């Protein structure tokens, strides 16, 4: 059960006082920092791993971390940031639910002299309102998924897309990246696209509807913006006698433990890795900044990777094959 904000902030104050006492009694100095972390929620395995890593890393660095779970609500998250400002924390880390709606509260933090760091997801705001964003390249992740599929299907494929939370940076950018690769292949196209809100239940429900609408007939592939939605979709497909991993091909993003299990079973073909244990990247920047370092780039990039199972036999979507269009022989990831 999430701890109510006020109680959490009180606990943080107690923890901060304890740390201050430790300093007075001769323990190592400069550790009494309190950092507010406005987290998206706990919608996916990736997210919970990330939260646990932040807590672990804070303990390691003897920093007090106030972790607030927004349960995927942008309004709740903005309210939390205002509470952090009122509590006069030393720094605020935000993993924003959506990209919009941040200018006012970021300006308030700046006016209060509290540095803000954007982690994981992005904001569409004036960059002078935050110190840096520490995150992977979601657009590249979409491109990697698209490139894998172009190769596996020899550039001929009908695709069902399961999108993440509408208005969130990973949903927007993974879609853009994936589509930019498909645009190079006249034989590849997305035939339907719906949101499953990055949850397993969401992915399952959307896939059940897609199956009922006949969209999986002669389908080449499913692309999901995260592994949790894909795992839900795999469950729905298998329940209807489909063979995800063979027909249709399956590719998603995150590379969580469950995805590797699904790959070992042959249900998932590939997953693009979004590193979840990124606490060290974030605290390096936040604590470095608090210690006086000022030369951080606006985007501290976390690298991406792709993991694929054994090569599946290609199964092109018959509807999209266009004999009049010359098939491109090689792929350039734009
Ligand atoms: O912002 C990163 C995305 O958010 C992850 O891919 C997804 O699992 C999470 O919900």
Image (cartoon, rainbow, N blue to C red):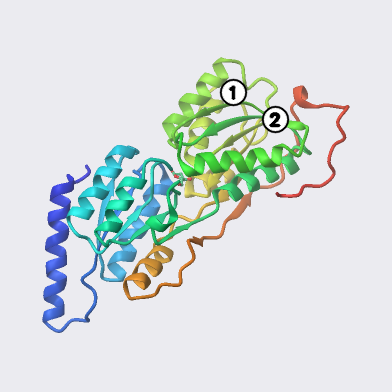
Q: How crowded is mark 1: few (under 14 residues within 10 Å), some or many (20 or more)?
A: few
As rendered, which of 304 and 98 lies closer to the eye?
98
Residue 268 visible, this orientation: no
Q: Is residue 166 above or below residue 208?
A: below
Q: Is residue 157 above or below residue 61?
A: above
Q: Is residue 187 left or right of residue 134?
A: right
Residue with the mark numbered 1: 241
Q: Residue at x 52, y 31 (%)?
A: 233
Q: Where is residue 232 in the image (x, y as percent from the top left)?
A: 48, 32
Q: Where is residue 309 in the image (x, y as percent from the top left)?
A: 64, 47
Q: Is residue 27 above or below residue 138?
A: below
Q: Where is residue 212 in the image (x, y as percent from the top left)?
A: 55, 15
Q: Tell me which corner region of the image, top left, top right, bottom left or bottom right, holds residue 202.
A: top left
The label nearer to you, 1 versus 2, is 2
User: How many numbered marks does the figure carry?
Assistant: 2
Q: Residue at x 22, y 80 (%)?
A: 29
Residue with the mark numbered 2: 189
Q: Position of residue 17 (x, y in %)?
A: 12, 68
Q: Is residue 308 left or right of residue 16?
A: right
Q: Which of the two discs, 1 and 2, labels the residue nearer the N terminus?
A: 2
The furthest residue to the top = 213
Disc ID at residue 177 = none
Q: Which residue is drawn at 58% across and 38% down?
A: 175
Q: Residues within 10 Å of mark 2 (few under 14, many from 20)?
A: many
Mark 2 within 8 Å of ligand 1, using the beta carbon: no
Q: In this view, does 292 lie to the left or right of 86?
A: right
Q: In this view, does 45 lie to the left or right of 303?
A: left
Mark 1 within 8 Å of ligand 1, using the beta carbon: no
Q: Whole-Å distance between the Cαs marked 1 and 2?
A: 24 Å
């Amino acid at each position: 059960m999430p701890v109510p904000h006020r109680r959490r902030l009180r606990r943080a104050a107690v923890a901060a006082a304890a740390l201050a006492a430790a300093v007075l009694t001769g323990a190592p100095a400069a550790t009494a920092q309190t950092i507010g972390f406005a987290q998206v929620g706990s919608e996916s395995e990736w997210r919970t791993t990330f939260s646990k890593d932040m807590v672990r890393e804070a303990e390691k660095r003897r920093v007090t971390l106030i972790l607030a779970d927004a349960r995927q609500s942008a309004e709740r998250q903005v309210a939390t940031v205002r509470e952090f400002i009122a509590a006069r924390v030393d720094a605020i880390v935000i993993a924003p639910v959506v990209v919009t709606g941040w200018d006012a509260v970021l300006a308030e933090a700046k006016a209060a002299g509290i540095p803000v760091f954007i982690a994981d997801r992005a904001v569409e705001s004036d960059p002078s309102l935050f110190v840096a964003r520490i995150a992977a390249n979601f657009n590249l992740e979409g491109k990697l998924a698209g490139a894998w599929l172009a190769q596996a299907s020899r550039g001929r494929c009908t695709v069902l897309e399961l999108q993440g939370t509408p208005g969130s940076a990973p949903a927007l950018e993974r879609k853009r990246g994936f589509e930019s690769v498909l645009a190079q292949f006249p034989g590849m196209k997305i035939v339907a696209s719906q949101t499953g809100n990055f949850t397993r239940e969401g992915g399952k429900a959307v896939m059940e509807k897609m199956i009922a609408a006949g969209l999986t007939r002669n389908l080449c592939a499913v692309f999901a913006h995260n592994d949790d939605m894909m795992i839900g979709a795999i469950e729905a497909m298998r329940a209807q006698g489909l063979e995800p991993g063979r027909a249709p091909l399956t590719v998603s993003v995150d590379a969580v433990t469950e995805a590797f299990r699904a790959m070992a079973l042959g249900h998932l073909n590939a997953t693009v890795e979004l590193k979840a244990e990124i606490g060290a990247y974030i605290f390096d920047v936040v604590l470095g900044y608090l210690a006086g370092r000022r030369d951080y780039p606006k985007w501290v990039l976390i690298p991406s990777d792709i993991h694929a199972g054994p090569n599946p036999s290609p199964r092109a979507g018959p509807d999209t094959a266009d004999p009049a269009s010359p098939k491109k022989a090689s792929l350039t990831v734009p």
